[in-house]
Image (cartoon, helix red, strand yellow):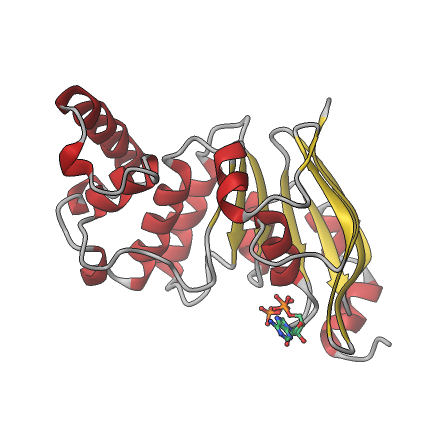
């Protein structure tokens, strides 16, 4: 299968701190890959660099055959890369439906001025996306009134409504109740198979349920990679999590 995302020798240094220090990763279309590691391992920084929010100190990023290393986050999202954040980034005073409509057409923010047919088509698309994430009942509820679990789902719906080819998820299960976590896993498992997903996640059960392959990051570098079962059985990984590794 053709490689979709190719990250080569990526580095990000903050002064003396080597947050990411030579990280490489290749994903094919439809891959479900998790990036795990202890706090401060560099996972979010990798995600930020792929999304275009943080500039690499060195290294290259290719997406669908094009070098996007120098592109900003807006151009990357137009190229088909969508992301969620550790803390959901939503328009709290807008309804769930409005959040999706605006995300579907980000360069024409005031949707009241769009042609009627265009608005109807976008509304229908946004509703379908809300339904896919079991949020249709909340269509007219302000994002700010949602529970934490539903906000997480709404953020994923917002990321998906622009039809990305690569979805970057930064700790989607953080702070969720068990019931919300199960709902999240069901939604993520139902994503279109051709969508590539790169997930940063601390919950092992979520990683096992979603990811086909896992990379363990340690001190900004790849420690190892494998299937979730291989990683769970790897003594080197256990050492890192117990804090006894170098
Ligand atoms: N903008 C920044 N300026 C300075 N240091 C930073 C910056 N962003 C991240 N760091 C540092 O880089 C290192 C890696 O951070 P990063 O957030 O990527 O880790 P992480 O693996 O995602 O951790 P966590 O699981 O806690 O979110 C940390 O030591 C962090 O303090």
**Residue at left 39%, top 63%?**
176
Residue 226 seen in this snapshot: no
Judge by depth and name the residue closer to the eye, 121 or 186: 121
Count of marks, rendered view? 0
- Residue 71: image location, x then y, percent: 61, 44
Whether 117 is drawn above or below 127: the answer is: above
- In this view, which residue lies farthest toward the right? 246
Quarter that holds the C terminus:
bottom right
Instruction: Tell me which residue sits at (60%, 61%) in the image.
Output: 44
- Quadrant (top left, top right, bottom left, bottom right) of the N terminus: top right
Q: Does any portion of residue 128 appear in the rendered image?
A: yes
Q: Is residue 136 above or below residue 65?
A: below
Where does ligand 1 appear, by image quarter? bottom right
* Apparent side of residue 31 relative to residue 124 in the rendered image (left or right): right
Task: Tell me: residue 212, above or below residue 208.
Answer: above
101 or 199, nearer to the observer: 101
Instruction: Point out residue 205 in the picture as x, y percentages from the top left corner.
Output: 55, 56
Q: Position of residue 178 (x, y in %)?
A: 39, 61
Residue 245 lies left or right of residue 212; in this view the side is right
């Amino acid at each position: 299968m053709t490689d979709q995302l190719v990250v080569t020798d990526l580095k990000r240094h903050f002064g003396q701190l080597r947050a990411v220090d030579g990280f490489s990763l290749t994903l094919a279309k439809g891959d479900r890959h998790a990036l795990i590691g202890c706090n401060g391992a560099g996972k979010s920084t990798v995600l930020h660099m792929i999304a275009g929010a943080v500039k690499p100190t060195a290294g290259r990023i290719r997406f669908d055959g094009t070098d996007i290393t120098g592109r900003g986050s807006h151009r990357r999202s137009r190229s088909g890369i969508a992301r969620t954040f550790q803390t959901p980034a939503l328009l709290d005073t807008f309804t769930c439906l409005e959040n999706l409509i605006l995300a579907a057409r980000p360069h024409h923010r005031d949707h009241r001025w769009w042609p009627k047919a265009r608005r109807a088509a976008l509304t229908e698309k946004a509703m379908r996306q809300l339904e896919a994430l079991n949020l249709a009942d909340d269509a007219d509820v302000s994002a700010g009134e949602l529970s934490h679990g539903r906000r997480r789902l709404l953020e994923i719906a917002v990321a998906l409504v622009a039809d990305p080819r690569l979805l970057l998820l930064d700790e989607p299960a953080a702070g969720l109740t068990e019931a919300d976590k199960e709902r999240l896993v069901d939604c993520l498992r139902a994503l279109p198979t051709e969508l590539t997903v790169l997930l940063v996640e601390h919950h092992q059960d979520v990683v096992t349920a979603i990811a086909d392959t896992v990379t363990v990051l340690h001190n900004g570098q790849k420690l190892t990679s494998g299937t979730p079962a291989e990683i769970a059985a790897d003594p080197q990984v256990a050492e890192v999590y117990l804090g006894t590794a170098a």
